[in-house]
Image: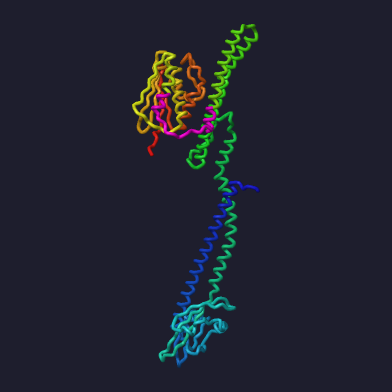
Amino acid sequence: MTRLTLRTTLTLIYTCILALLLVTLGVVYYEVLARHLDADATDDLQKMTGGLRGYIHVEAGSPVLAYDRNDPQEVAFIGEATRYFRISDANTGEPLEQSPAFAALGGGAEAPNVWTDRARALVYDVHSAQGRIRISRSMLTSNRGDAYLLQVGLPLDPIDGDLARFVRLLLWSLPVGLVAAVVTGRLMAGRALAPLARLAAATRTISVADLRRRLPVRGVNDELDEVADAFNETLARLEQAVGEMRQFSAALAHELRTPLAALRGETELALLHDRSLDDYRRGLASQLEELDKLARLINQLLTLARAEAGQIPLSRDPVDLAALGAAVVEQLEPVAQAVGLEMRFDAPDAPVVTGDQAWLQRLLLNMLDNAIKFTPAGGRIAVHVSRENGTARLDVSDTGVGIAPGALPHVFERFYRGEPDRSPHADGAGLGLALSKWIADRHGATLDVVSRPGEGSTFTVRLPLRSRV
């Protein structure tokens, strides 16, 4: 089935609406015109009947017309008023005087209640070979009390002719108007859609290789400009995502190249020279260490990929943040002491949040692991749990090397590890903080960092408090 273009669809809709409007207006105008013409005809007939009554006199028991035959106006009026004219005896119904045209109407000139309802004025229409005639009837009474029935007719051919011409005019003008509407509507639709076509053409020129290009905006702030702005915003997000993917690919290649190069070098050395059993064991141990690094990296990548794909479900249970912090600090305190660091825990409040305890524990573990890596021996690490403005706050502070201001916006990016000389024993892949940011986002929390080079860093997590039921 062939689908219509948007231009054709808009033209058809516009034409159908206009056709319906024209037909409706035509019917309404016809009805209004017919009612007005009908009311005017009735009014003219009543005026003519009233004027004719003034010229009728009863002489010798018989009604006669008395008027000045030398007055052209009276002659013209009497001639028009008596074209369809009859005076009858009100009791017997016998015609006393009538015009030839009225006599030709025959019995069709009588309404059903002409004689049975003589006291009421009556206006009715009759259909004859001469066309439609409107007849009025009224009573005449002589001085002696004799009653006569006066019937005066007015032909409605002019009215019917005007209405017929009006209908013919509608029947001719409607198709012409619709044809003009189709042509005009198509031109207007094409003109209205021309900016959209230009946007489509500009869109086709944008490729993944050049995502810096943007669609032109006309600056009139209309709907098309909104579409262009929205598409440009999408392009900006896509450009950022593609840039992150490229950066991720480069970083991943770098992270994999180092352990693989070490493994290859040790293997080549083992093959080139004869070695003792102890040398082979030490070489294999070193290779196992590099393999463990690769396994950790791959596991972190898989976890982060599943997390960003929404494949990791989180439970929604009450979590005592103070108890969770105490447990994690107790778990890592021996590790900190082994490298000469002091670890403290402080929780003046015991805020309860809603979330997944295992993932929140991992969030805190990642932040503490990061603090241990970048804090020299003799430094301090502090964990503080409190309430703040209706939220639960978790702070991890250290007296480490700190983070440069230019690196702060990137610390939560994958594989970002800042300056290579920040810590001589930092051997991570730069995925811990990226995973921590994902955990915070999934719990509706915020994760911020404040740092000064040489003075240390403070990572702050703010989580919504669990509502009381």
Q: Quadrant of residue 174?
A: bottom right
* Residue visible at 53% across and 76% down in the picture: 155
Q: Which residues are magenta?
A: 303-327
| Type of colouring | rainbow
Magenta run includes residue 367: no
The image shows residue 169 at horizontal and vertical percentages of 57, 63
Image vertical order of residue 317 relative to residue 427, above or below: below
Q: Residue furthest bottom?
A: 60
Report the front residue among 463 and 358: 358
Vertical placement of 313 versus 69: above or below?
above
Quarter placement of the C terminus:
top left
98 is higher (above) or lower (below) than 443: below
Left/right placement of residue 201 relative to residue 41 reads: right
Say which residue appears at 50% left-offset and 17% top-offset: 427
The location of residue 65, given as percent across then percent down, is 47, 86
Determine the residue positioned at 59% across, 8% down. Answer: 279
Question: Between residues 417 and 23, which one lies in front from this camera angle?
Answer: 417
**Can residue 253 be seen at all in this image of the molecule?**
yes
Q: Residue at x 57, y 83 (%)?
A: 104
Outermost residue, left side? 348
Closer to the camera in the image, 247 or 48: 247
- Residue 316 is covered by the magenta coloring: yes
Residue 203 on image: x %, y %: 57, 36
